[in-house]
Amino acid sequence: MQSPICTMLGIEFPLLAFSHCRDVVVAVSKAGGMGVFGAASLPPERLEEELAWIDAHIGGRPYGVDLIVPNSFAGKGEARSALPPIPAEHKAFVADLLVKHGVDDGNLALPSVGGGLGENMTDDGAAKLLEVAFRHPIKLIANALGVPPPLMLELGKRFDVPVAALVGTRDHALAQVRAGVDILVVAGGEAGGHCGEIATMVLVPEVAAAVEAVGATTPILAAGGIVTGRQMAAAMAMGAHGAWTGSVWLTTAEAETNPIVKEKMLTATSRDTVRSKSRTGKPSRQLRSPWTDAWEAEGAPKPLPMPLQSLVSEPALRKVDKLSEGGHEGAKALATYWVGQGVGLMNEAMGTGQVVQEFKTDWIAACERLNGFIGH
């Protein structure tokens, strides 16, 4: 395909797949797209293990790595010990919610500060992950939640690896262009995970026009609710050069998604997601459940700023996942995960390679349909 994304990344079809599952990453790349491994929550030693496995199984196909290094969060630039403690109100709220659903006896241990995802968001933590990533033959490095840190941009140029950045507004996109990123991932509010308020249908052409107006040629990947080839074709008709996808891979055979959550996704409609700060402290779209409803209810504590809210939510939701897989009814009700509004079109469990082929077939059919309107 004649897309600058294909040329830049050395791939056959400009479909990128963000996934925390190494098997999905490998399968997408082998099918002609590009898998992008989500590494934000992994310590450096685990990232090394995962990337070594991908190298051994991907057959030399291109793949990428995605990190979350936000421009701002609670305690950025401070020692971890300087972060405020988790308020007792939030600990009690989570404990009461779990007890109400029979998931815990009220003694769930929540950390005070530090570690995990929050540590990786610091400049030092990100530098350690970048050091690992660039020891491997990656063909893309991506950053979410702001302009990539200078080290990421520097390493990208040094190793000739394109740097991508997620944006949710026109102004964010222009700031990324000025910073020198190589690919814009233009994510609409339909997206799973962290997202803004502007719909993909509006945001993609708005950013495309703005980039063109400043004389830039930075290619665009459309994101947000895209789970079919016809949606991908529509986005490319609006100015994108390919698609960045995430949610559609969560229900594949290779995905490590909690089976209970997979079942929920396969029967969900586009109205069964909610954009909430309850998981990370920044707005992110996820499957609606009594967990998300509780945080939106009157009297609920205000979610803490990133990364503190994750220290409240993740230990609890890990326990929910474990018990739900064992058949615990209360945990099954609470179980949730990030997913976009495109979940309403994700009605059939398929293998990852089959999903890629479905994208290609659907994309071609959509383009032929559009071409059919010309000259009639």
Image (cartoon, rainbow, N blue to C red):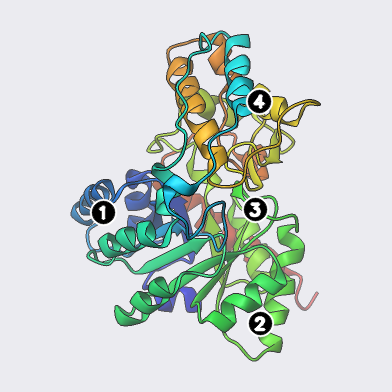
Residue 83: percent from left, percent from top: 50, 46
> What's the CA distance linking mark 1 and mark 4?
33 Å
Q: Compare marks 3 and 2 and give the one earlier in the sequence.
A: 3
Tell me, for residue 211, which label it has, or none.
Answer: 2
Q: Which residue lies furthest to the bottom in this view?
A: 215
* Amino acid type at mark 1: Leu
Q: Compare marks 1 and 4 and give the one earlier in the sequence.
A: 1
> What's the CA distance linking mark 4 and mark 3?
19 Å
- Pointer 1 with pointer 4, Cβ within 8 A: no
- The residue under the point 54% across, 25% down is 263
> What's the CA distance linking mark 1 and mark 2?
34 Å
When asked about the image quadrant of residue 147, the answer is bottom right
Alpha-carbon neighbours of circle 2 within 10 Å: few (<14), some, or many (≥20)?
many
Tell me, for residue 51, which label it has, or none.
Answer: 1
Q: Relative to 6, is 267 above or below?
A: above
* Amino acid type at mark 4: Ser
Q: Compare marks 4 and 3 and give the one earlier in the sequence.
A: 3
Q: Which of 206 and 166 is in front in this view?
A: 166
Alpha-carbon neighbours of circle 3 within 10 Å: few (<14), some, or many (≥20)?
many
Tell me, for residue 195, which label it has, or none.
Answer: 3
Kind of element beneath mark 2: helix
Q: Compare marks 3 and 1 and give the one earlier in the sequence.
A: 1
Q: Relative to 196, is 85 above or below?
A: above
Q: Quadrant of the C terminus?
A: bottom right
> What's the CA distance linking mark 4 and mark 2?
39 Å
